[in-house]
């Protein structure tokens, strides 16, 4: 769900945005504000601001520029002169009034793409911390290729090193730490990064480096469902 804040000093403009937003299932209106002061109180709850530029007291442009970590922003204005400045402050899009629902919908699509890209970047930077040989080792989640269990231990195979990281852990503990939308259990002894799987058969999968891992009967149906779904969501 995309959480949006609408900022415009014209009530009719806010009403139109509300009508358009009501036609997009994954767009939620958190607040509709007529001034930047009231908009500021909602910043921690929103993903995007649709902001008019010509506002009393403080312009929408100045408002966005004053924020240290602003949400995504789409500027809405009746003047084309501000387009260059809008993109200088990181605007995702620029809607020139009066705009149609189709134009608004395209802007929401750009916001959706930007949020997905931001989420992917955040995921790539996230780290987990494992204890191995009496030391704590930080590991980027994006560096994990697959996980293999043997007895009470787990081997974590990384893209950055040849030797796996060996830790004392159960599969359940590992699964709880890994992002469920990215890692899938394919066998009683294997968890794989679904994004690294290049092909899947009835009894095995092939990773992007050509390595083959087994697929267990118990996990095949769930794995194949998620594997096929991963292509649909791309």
Image (cartoon, rainbow, N blue to C red):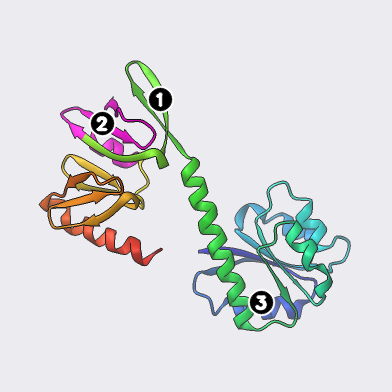
Q: Residue at x 19, y 27 (%)?
A: 152
Circle on res. 48? none
Q: Position of residue 177 (x, y in %)?
A: 36, 39
Viewed as shown, does residue 212 lie left or right of 81?
left
* Residue underneath mark 3: 17
**Mark 2 residue element:** strand
* Residue underneath mark 1: 137
Q: Quadrant of residue 80?
A: bottom right
Numbered disc in front, either 3 or 2: 2
Viewed as shown, does residue 157 lie left or right of 29?
left
Circle on res. 155? 2
Determine the residue located farthest toward the top in the rendered image: 134
What's drawn in magenta, residue-wise?
149-177
Which one is in front, 98 or 205? 205
Q: Relative to residue 188, is residue 204 depicted above or below?
A: below
Which one is in front, 199 or 189? 199
Q: Position of residue 178 (x, y in %)?
A: 35, 42
Q: Position of residue 204 (x, y in %)?
A: 16, 51
The numbered mark, 1 or 3, whose residue comes first in the sequence reads 3
């Amino acid at each position: 769900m995309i959480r949006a804040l609408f900022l415009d000093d014209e009530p009719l403009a806010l009403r139109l945005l509300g009508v358009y937003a009501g036609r997009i299932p994954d767009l939620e209106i958190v607040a509709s504000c007529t001034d930047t002061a009231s908009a500021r109180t909602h910043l921690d709850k929103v993903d995007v601001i649709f902001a008019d530029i010509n506002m009393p007291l403080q312009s929408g442009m100045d408002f966005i520029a004053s924020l240290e970590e602003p949400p995504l922003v789409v500027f809405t204005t009746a003047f084309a002169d501000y387009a260059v400045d809008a993109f200088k402050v990181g605007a995702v899009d620029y809607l020139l009034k009066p705009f149609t629902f189709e134009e608004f919908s395209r802007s929401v699509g750009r916001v959706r793409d930007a949020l997905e890209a931001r989420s992917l970047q955040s995921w790539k930077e996230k780290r987990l911390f494992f204890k191995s040989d009496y030391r704590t080792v930080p590991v980027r989640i994006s560096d994990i290729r697959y996980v293999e269990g043997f007895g009470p231990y787990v081997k974590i195979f990384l893209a950055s090193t040849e030797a796996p990281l060996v830790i004392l852990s159960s599969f359940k503990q590992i699964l709880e730490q890994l992002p469920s939308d990215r890692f899938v259990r394919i066998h009683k002894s294997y968890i794989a990064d679904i994004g690294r799987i290049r092909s899947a058969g009835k009894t095995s999968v092939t990773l992007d480096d050509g390595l083959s891992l087994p697929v267990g009967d118990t996990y095949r149906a769930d794995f194949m469902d998620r594997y096929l779904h991963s292509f649909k969501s791309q």
